[in-house]
Amino acid sequence: MTLYLYAQVGLILGIFLGGMGWAVAEAVPPLMPEATAAARSRQAQQQDDLTAIDRYDRQQHPFTAAQETHWRQTLWATAVREPQGERARAAEGAIVDLLTLATAPTAPTPTQERLITQALQVAHQLYTAQPQEFAGLEGALGALVRGGDDRQIPQGEALVRASWVAAALTALVEGGQQGDPRTLLAQVQENFPQEAQLLPLSLALRDLARGENPPPLPPLGDLLQGWLQGELAQPGQAWVYVLCRPDRGVLCRVLVKDDRGQFYLDPQAEDRVWSVLLSGRSLHGLPWYLSRGETPQGLYRMEAPFPSRIRTISAPMVTSL
């Protein structure tokens, strides 16, 4: 991942003009149970119940719209608990069957598309963490990157497939069981010329090609103290800095510069630069370019207008970025 992720992103702020200034509309979050030891134990048991072997039975629970909630809950619990032993084999079998639908001659239904996407996220998590324990996933992941479907597919479906191939490719490379990853990357580019031009797969190919030798990062101090020049400097637009450490167990930090190149100040203490923490880790260990992946670090240009009189900012103004 590189610090220079210059992406134009729309900012949905939920800011409404009224009175003497701007106010932030905040939704009241639902009450959460207290995280006591007893509550954690109950939650763990509930998740264990959702990974019982019979929940992976495809005869009893086919991949249909009527069973979608069942499978989404089961796959989520599989990711949370990472079952072992017989439960692991049952989970692995169900995930393989779902991934097989992605390369079947008949196009998957919308329900199956959603389940395949979630199954790939869980497959990435399990295979990259324990490639030997979940070696049974390798064949289904490999079939996705080799391409097992000669249907002529529309652009919308091509985008979905590009994200699937990107997830499968990333899992195989990061699982380290495929030898030289350059051979696999070249194979994917050859097998999926259309999808390789689409954002999910093109980003995966670029990021994985860098391997262990990413380009050097620019000096962070220069970025924080200086101001963006040339084509990156857009009048009337603010910038968001998302700074993350390699260890995504450490929270990322967000800073914002206004359209004059000045950092926004904390409304509670205007002599202090405002910042907010972001969770950076992906439950599934997915990289930033995949859905439910790690929070991408970098510089983001806000295209929403900011009134010049606003010199302070608060967390709700950025959390919906």
Image (spheres, rainbow, N blue to C red):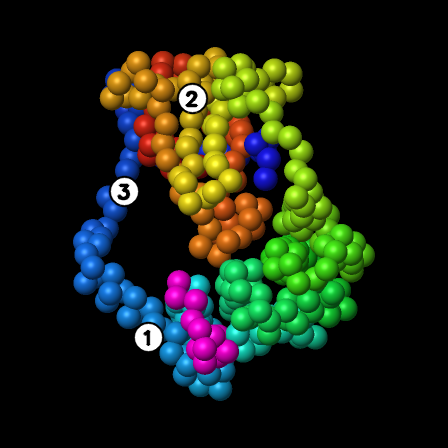
| Residue in the image at 34% along x and 72% along y | 48
Q: Which residue is mark 3?
A: 27
Q: Earlier in the sequence, mark 1 or mark 2?
A: 1
Say which element carries label 3.
loop
- Residue underneath mark 1: 49
Classify residue 74 by image quadrant. Answer: bottom left
Residue 225 appears in the picture as rendered: yes
State yes or no: residue 189 in magenta.
Answer: no
Is mark 2 in CB contact (under 8 Å) with mark 3? no
- Give the residue pinned by disc 2: 306
Q: Amino acid at mark 1?
A: Asp
Could you say which disc has been placed on residue 156 in the image?
A: none
Which residue is outermost to the right? 190
Secondary structure mainly formed by the magenta segment: helix
Q: Earlier in the sequence, mark 2 or mark 3?
A: 3
Image quadrant containing the N terminus = top right
| Range covered by the magenta-colored residues | 80-91
- The kind of residue tagged 3 is Ala
Q: CA distance from mark 3 to mark 1?
A: 32 Å
Q: Is residue 114 visible?
A: no
125 left or right of 78 in image? right
Whole-percent x and y of residue 216? 64, 30
